[in-house]
Amino acid sequence: MTIRVGLIGFGLSGRVFHAPFVINDPDMEMAYVCSSKVEEVRTALPEVTVVSTAEAVFSASDVDLVVITTPNALHFEQAKLALENGKHVLLEKPSVTSVSQIEALCSLAKQQGLVFCVYQNRRFDGDLQRLKALIDGAELGELKHLDSRFDRFRPLAQARWREEPGVGTGIFWDLGPHILDQVLFLFGAPKWLHASIDCLREGCQTHDWFELELGYDDKRIRLGSTPFEAGDMRRFNARFTQGSWQCVGLDPQEEALRAGQMPWQSEFPAQQHNTRFVAHTQNDIETFQESATQGDYAAFYRQLGHAIAGKGDAPVSMEQACQLIYGLCLAEQSAETGQRVAWDYTPRLG
């Protein structure tokens, strides 16, 4: 079974994070791209049909899966229309910005018997996979405290839609879905959440800084992002009962993709990065290179293809997609009130 794909949008997300993996997957074929960048698409994908409207993709009889990478404000209506036209849907993060919208999309997909999935590719980062192995294998005992950060040095506001006022813009809705989803993937829902979301750069029009704390019965998790981290980013700092583990730097797959490396190339991702793992125990210090735990974004598409073929579960379940949007909205509520808020949610899917 070949899954024919229609890609909506050919900006950074569509061009870098999706098209290469559709092309790479032996069970998929890129059939359509909806974009105004006609020549750019034809240069990269000469055999693909380029159309000017998303509706042309949704109504095409030879499309099985629609991948939506448009700005956040368009996600709900486009995903809804694709599902109504009988298409499986992969929706870029953040999927939508309200619980009612994500529940509506998931309920519609269930009613139609279709796969609806949100693109949380950073579940397949090598650093997260290493951390999960440490937790599952209890190599350093029981996890008690985790810091997870996605910092950058961008002290000046930029002219791009993600930094303009609007629903779902700003750094919290850009990076928050990655690191909160990772925590929900590892530990499930917390008991409570406390958040602070702010705008710190001169001239910024939407939030560019955030800190979240999640409370579990036996552990505490802190998440955050700042635009003022000029040195190496400490991606994870995990404290266990028998030691601690840190990851400095970011999984190299994004850097490789941006540099034009393709997932089918044997050297992908080239190890030209500064990521390092360090584990501290009572008696020694052990250092791991990133190559010891290889990330694999292609596995996301493989698992998605299996789900569409009825051979397994999607890489992100609809219940998990709902939990994430609830958590992001709950964090905004906490930031607005300055209060710790209880996590009390069960997805309502028809």
Image (cartoon, grey):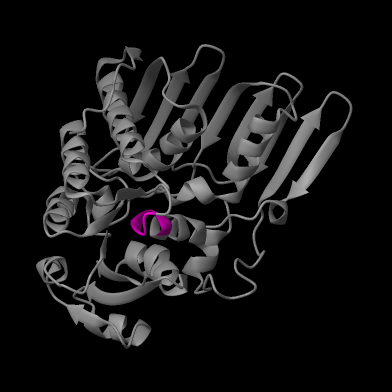
Position in image of residue 82 (x %, y %): 16, 58
The image shows residue 257, relative to residue 95, as above or below, that is below
The image shows residue 21, relative to residue 163, as above or below, that is below
Task: Give the residues drawn in magenta, as a range.
Answer: 306-310
Specify the principal SS of the magenta part: helix
The image shows residue 254, relative to residue 191, as above or below, that is below
Looking at the picture, tell me which residue is in the foreground, 133 or 303: 303
Position in image of residue 57 (x %, y %): 16, 70
- Report the quarter where the N terminus lies: bottom left
Looking at the picture, tell me which residue is in the foreground, 289 or 77: 77
Q: Residue at x 57, y 41 (%)?
A: 235
Q: Number of callouts in the render?
A: 0
Position in image of residue 265 (x %, y %): 58, 76
Q: Residue at x 17, y 49 (%)?
A: 112
- Report the quarter where the C terminus lies: top left
Please tell me whether residue 276 belongs to the stretch shown in magenta: no
Position in image of residue 194 (x %, y %): 38, 18
Q: Is residue 18 left or right of residue 138?
A: left
Q: Is residue 33 left or right of residue 150?
A: left
Please tell me whether residue 308 belongs to the stretch shown in magenta: yes
Residue 232 visible in the snapshot: no
Residue 304 visible in the snapshot: yes
